[in-house]
Image (spheres, helix red, strand yellow):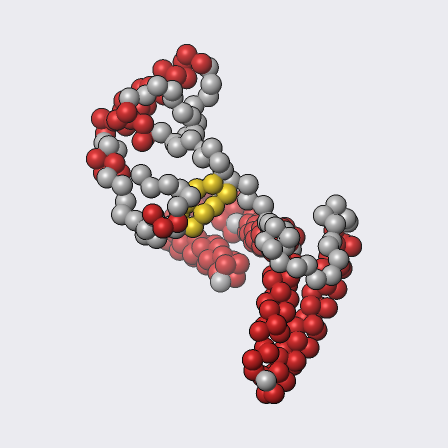
Amino acid sequence: MASQDDPGAVAPYPQPPSYLWSQFTEENEAAINELRDKHEAETGEPRTAGTIVPDVPEALAVLQPPEPPQNGRWRVFGQMYNLSNQLPSLEEQGVARLGVPIPADSAEKDAHASKVFELKKLSKSLLLNFLELAGILAINPRDAADKLADLQTIFFNMHQHINEWRPHQTREALISMLQAQLERTRNETRALHEVTDSVRKTLVGLADVEDPLAGSAGNTAGTGAAAAESKAASQSASTQNTEAESKRSRQDDVWAALEETFG
């Protein structure tokens, strides 16, 4: 295997290793899960995706998470990465710092104002140096190397300030996203309450409507027995018609109220 620190021995886009399709089999998966269960029962440690079982067979070694690199560096697609994901300073990158460094332990408001002030100064300096570069190129292009180096230093300093601002930007973006989500949830809840109140008022109004059959039943009970016998046929047909019309009228009222509410 090529060394991780040798950039010339690693292809930018290497072929995937053969163990991805030769050793990740159902039998090996079952065997490593059995070893993990046994390790959990012996040690009492909770089983996680990063649990490493010691002394596993060589055929099952690739099924476990790899151990962290000892030097804290690893290579992916020809690029080196570090475990300590910290932004290197300008001095560590060999770039001259323009202006005074902003202390990391200063208040966020003061640091914010200082970064804005430094970026404004660098922007003005960038414009001035660009105008000077244009003048040098017009008179003697051979002397433009020093001015190009100055422009590069200014760009490096501006890029450093912007990168140092990333945590603040991420925090503010997360706050804005959570506020938008909270406002959207409140609007949806408010709309549901409004619809619920409207339906409740509609149902209460329908419950207060008097049933015309109740009055007709009471009047019919008060009639004499003789009149009821003589008019049985006619009143039976009239009662059926009245009941059907009342039922249709109540149904029309319900549908009209629902259409008014949800229409």
Q: Which one is in front, 127 or 217?
A: 127
Total marks in image: 0
- The residue sitting at the bottom extreme is 139
Q: Residue at x 27, y 41 (%)?
A: 17
Q: In this view, does 198 lie to the left or right of 250?
A: right
Residue 58 pos. (x, y %): 28, 25
Residue 170 pos. (x, y %): 60, 52
Quadrant of image for the N terminus: top left
Q: Which one is in front, 32 or 233?
A: 32
Residue 198 in view, yes or no: no
- Residue 39 found in image quarter: top left
Residue 29, compared with residue 4, is above or below; it is above
Q: Residue at x 69, y 65 (%)?
A: 119
Q: Residue at x 31, y 31 (%)?
A: 62
- The residue sitting at the top extreme is 42
Residue 116 pos. (x, y %): 72, 63
Residue 212 in view, yes or no: yes
Residue 163 pos. (x, y %): 61, 56
Residue 73, compared with residue 206, is above or below; it is above
